[in-house]
Image (cartoon, rainbow, N blue to C red):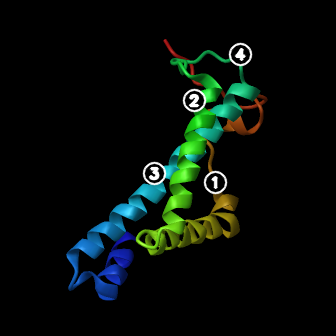
Amino acid sequence: MALSTLQIIWFLGGKHNVAFMGGFLVSMIVFAGMVSDVMQSISFIQLRAKYFAITRPFRSPFGTFGAYLTIAICMVTLAYQFFDPLYRWAAIAAASWYFVGLAYFGFYRRHRLVLSPEEEFAVTGGRHGVPVELN
């Protein structure tokens, strides 16, 4: 998929404007990073709430406040990308790839998942599978 994205950007204007192509790609990377950070923060908050008693190898010094702060900063960054004309098309392109991936997962791939023991533990609420044990 990345190759086809690069080709589309190249033909839309990257062939004659390398700065456009570089800026477009960096903007897409920032978009992906912000989405990733939001998802990780949401997962952190959910794990902290549902499985507060599990042994953890690391405890965040900022706790859930840090996760909420991360979500707020990422949302401001994402909003800035959509409202700034310089970054808008890169954000739209990245969001389109996310929606294509979500549709693929939602309609096809989620019915063919094979869970690891840790994932099964998380999905079943601790009834099946084995949590990660640290030595």
Within-10-Å neighbours for mark 2: few <14, some 14–19, many 20+: some
128 or 36: which is nearer to us?
36
Q: Quadrant of the N terminus?
A: bottom left
Q: What mark, if any, has residue 113 been given in the picture?
A: 1
**Residue depicted at 63% across the width and 28% down the height:** 65
Q: Is the residue under label 3 in contact with that under label 1 (CB below 8 Å)?
A: no
**Residue depicted at 68% across the width and 65% down the height:** 106
CA–CA distance between discs 2 and 4?
20 Å
Q: Name the residue under label 4.
A: 53
Q: What residue type is labelled 1?
A: Leu
Q: In this rendering, does residue 134 appear at all?
A: yes
Residue 37 percent location from the top left of the image: 52, 44
**Residue depicted at 42% across the width and 56% down the height:** 30
Q: Mark 2 points at which residue?
A: 66
Q: Name the residue under label 3.
A: 33
Q: In this rendering, does residue 121 appear at all?
A: no
CA–CA distance between discs 3 and 2?
17 Å
Residue 83 percent location from the top left of the image: 53, 67
- Compared to residue 124, the image places residue 39 above or below, namely below
Within-10-Å neighbours for mark 1: few <14, some 14–19, many 20+: few
CA–CA distance between discs 1 and 3?
25 Å
Residue 63 percent location from the top left of the image: 60, 23
Q: Which amino acid does label 3 sit on?
A: Gly
Question: Hey, which quadrant is residue 69 in on the image?
Answer: top right
Q: What residue type is labelled 2?
A: Gly
